[in-house]
Amino acid sequence: LQVLIGRVPELKNAVLLNHIRHPVKNEVYPGLVPLVNSPSTEALLGRVCAGTRGILLLNITEQEQSIFDWFEDDEYERKTVRVKVEGSKENEPNEQEADVYIWSNPQSELDLDRLWEFDSFRKDRLDWYLRSTVIPCRREVVKLGLAG
């Protein structure tokens, strides 16, 4: 986030119900798709999947949102959904609206026999992904005038 939009906004852990992440074939990033609980999904997970854990970014500006839209490109479609916010205080809502990027290309481009694992990505591929993708994208964001 720091590299792409120039800051780290306030973050909260959240769960998007009824969705699952699969690796995009020949890539290091995932495709998030609506979940269809089936025997093959249960076999893959070892359980019925209730949802996908992620990070909710708070107080994103319109300019930052336009950077995310540009970065995610046409492989994804931004949709407004409801997420369950983890660790909400008593006076805070447990659910709230959030924009997520749903995979819009054919599902045949996803490895549906595997789950995309953030911890593995962070450990094995994040440094490479930052150098090869995010940093060049930030340069392009600046060149296009999308950054403030």
Image (cartoon, rainbow, N blue to C red):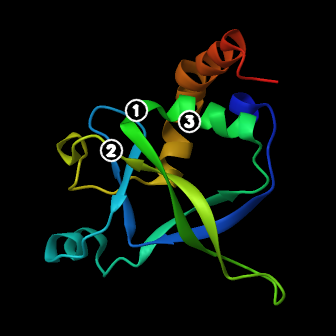
Q: Are marks 3 and 2 in contact (CB under 8 Å)?
A: no
Q: Amino acid at mark 3?
A: Asp
Q: Is 65 drawn above or below residue 54 in the view shown? A: above
Q: Is residue 65 or residue 15 the one in the foreground?
A: 65
Q: CA distance from mark 3 to mark 2?
A: 13 Å
Q: CA distance from mark 1 to mark 3?
A: 9 Å
Which numbered marker is on residue 69? 3
Q: CA distance from mark 2 to mark 1?
A: 8 Å
Horizontal side of residue 18 vs 44, given as left or right: right
Q: Amino acid at mark 2?
A: Ser
Q: Are marks 2 and 1 in contact (CB under 8 Å)?
A: yes
Q: Which residue is denoted by mark 2 in the rendering?
A: 104
Q: Which residue is denoted by mark 1 in the rendering?
A: 74
Residue 73: x and y, percent? 46, 30
**First-in-chain label (1 vs 3):** 3
**Residue plotted at (73% across, 32% down):** 5
**Residue plotted at (76% across, 56% down):** 58
- SS class, disc 2: loop
